Amino acid sequence: QVQLVESGGGLVQPGKSLRLSCTASGTIGNIYAMGWYRQAPGKQRELVATITTGRPTNYADAVKGRFTISRNNAKNTVDLQMNSLKPEDTAVYYCYLSLGYSGPYFDYWGQGTQVTVSS
């Protein structure tokens, strides 16, 4: 069984920063990808940033230059540093993990952490 636990969400003013962290535990095999998605009220879940083995780090256009993702393979963690936050960044942020070598891949999700950007 694989579990993802997120932390670091909260209420922050526009222009400020937050750091999200996610730790994977359980039977962790080969990590193919880890990252973050988000879902705002009334909208579909969307990619924020992912780190995939053997590929460039991927960021959504809306967060490029403001968010930085980092992964620690030894600790099975992935962090998201969010700077210059905007009200439109308000959403539930979900940690994502994909396990496997060359397929099939098995995907897991955290329970989500709320990020609210408001003055």
Image (cartoon, grey):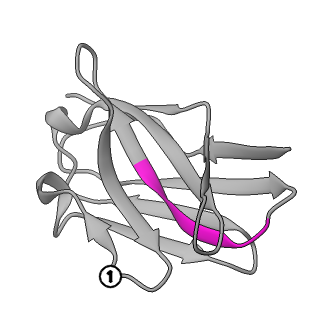
Looking at the image, the residue that sits furthest to the bottom is: 54
Q: Toward the viewer: 28 or 40?
A: 28
Using the image, determine if residue 64 lies above or below residue 114.
below
| Residue shown at 27% from the left, 31% from the top | 90
Q: What's the amino acid at mark 1?
A: Pro
Binning the other alpha carbons within 10 Å of mark 1 as few (below 14), some (14 to 19) or many (20 upward) gives few
Looking at the rendered structure, the secondary structure element under dot 1 is loop
Looking at the image, the residue that sits furthest to the left is: 61
Q: Toward the viewer: 8 or 51?
A: 51
> Picture coordinates of residue 5 (x, y %)?
69, 44
Pointer 1 residue: 56
Looking at the image, the residue that sits furthest to the top is: 42
Describe residue 105's horizontal placement relative to residue 1 as left or right: left
| Residue shown at 70% from the left, 56% from the top | 23
Q: Quadrant of residue 83?
A: bottom left
| Residue shown at 63% from the left, 77% from the top | 72
Describe residue 82's horizontal placement relative to residue 66 as left or right: right
Using the image, determine if residue 119 lies above or below residue 7.
above
Describe residue 49's horizontal placement relative to residue 10 as left or right: left
- Residue 31 in magenta? yes
> Picture coordinates of residue 113 (x, y %)?
52, 33
Residue 113 makes an appearance in the image: yes
Q: Is the magenta stretch mostly helix, strand or loop?
A: strand
Residue 116 makes an appearance in the image: no
Span of residues in magenta: 29-36
Using the image, determine if residue 86 lies above or below residue 58.
above
Q: Quick one: quadrant of the C terminus?
A: top left
Describe residue 33's horizontal placement relative to residue 72 as left or right: left
Q: In which quarter of the image is residue 8?
A: top right
| Residue shown at 34% from the left, 60% from the top | 49
> Picture coordinates of residue 76 (x, y %)?
71, 68
Q: Toward the viewer: 18 or 44?
A: 44
